Image: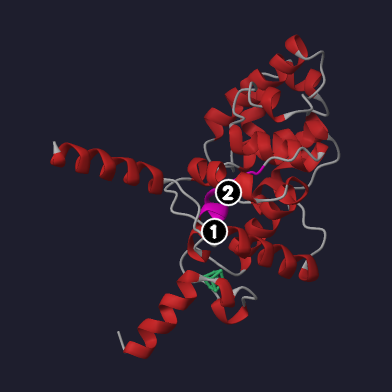
Amino acid sequence: MGSIRKGTRSSAVSKATRYSASPDAERKIKEIIRVFEEVEPSPTTELRYRNPYELVVATLLSAQCTDKRVNEITPAFFKKFPDVYALAKASPKEVYELIKTCSYPNNKTKYLVELAQKVVKEFGGKIPDNAKDLQKLPGIGKKSAHVIASTLYGEPVLGVDTHVFRVTKRLGLHSARSPEQTERVLSPLIPPEYRSKFHHWIILHGRYVCKARNPQCDQCPLTDICEYYKTKQVSRKDGS
Ligand code: SF4
């Protein structure tokens, strides 16, 4: 009996802790907002776009690809396919030729044409203006839908990609093991009006400072609240 109770309790604890935010996550989030509001008050995407259609296409192309590469591809793409109607009628071969220097060009070609056809057929040719409907489009997952909806329409949703997952993990904001879990645990702690900015701040920070392989902690304004940095300092002092 005792061991059953013990087992039950320990699995409940492990379930609860597996995806949870850290006890001081809210305090750290306030500090991140304070610091980045001073340094970069208007963060946004580095993808170039002029309207919702172009941001959706650029976001789809940016999966597993750099924004720089996408920005090299899209001018010719939008010249040939200036709107969803043009793209909905495109042949896969034409699309492929224009995006072949991007990662996964075969899948992206398929998604782009299907996406345009769906927007024409089911949304009257207009890009959906909310994250829920954006997720119904081929090739647009939850993260992309959140980024698009928050960037274009100010919807208070948090986009979590690998950069946001990695940086928030290093900062010690949560114990999540994936971007999806991170989005779930952090969203409620970030004031709705800051969710879009938070996404862009952390993406940019992850891209230029808190890099995956070699974080540039000496250039980081968040060392005071960073778990990774604290641990690194302790190991240095210990000589390990
Ligand atoms: S202190 Fe280092 S590890 Fe921590 S957020 Fe800054 S760059 Fe990343």
Residue 186 has which mark? 2
Residue toward you, 81 or 93: 81
Residue toward you, 197 or 205: 197
Disc 1 and disc 2 in contact, CB within 8 angstroms: yes
Q: Residue at x 74, y 17 (%)?
A: 119
Q: Residue at x 70, y 43 (%)?
A: 73
Quarter for ligand 1? bottom right
Amino acid residing under circle 2:
Leu
**Residue 84: image location, x then y, percent:** 78, 22
Residue 27 has which mark? none
**The stretch drawn in magenta includes residue 4:** no
Q: Residue at x 71, y 34 (%)?
A: 57
Residue 168 has which mark? 1
Q: Quadrant of residue 146?
A: top right
The answer to whether 189 is drawn above or below residue 225 in the figure is: above
Q: Quadrant of residue 156?
A: top right
Classify 10 Å Cα crowding around label 2: few (below 14), some (14-19), many (20 and above).
Answer: many
Q: Which residues are magenta?
A: 158-165
Residue toward you, 94 or 20: 20
Classify 10 Å Cα crowding around label 1: few (below 14), some (14-19), many (20 and above).
Answer: many
The residue at label 2 has a CB less than 8 Å from ligand 1:
no
**Residue 68: image location, x then y, percent:** 67, 54
- Nearest to viewer (mark 1 / mark 2): 2
Quarter of the image containing the C terminus? bottom left
> Helix or strand or loop: what does disc 1 sit on?
helix
**Residue 7: image location, x then y, percent:** 20, 41
Amino acid residing under circle 1:
Thr
Position of 192 compared to 83: left or right?
left
The answer to whether 186 is drawn above or below residue 57 in the figure is: below
Distance between mark 1 and mark 2 Cα atoms = 9 Å
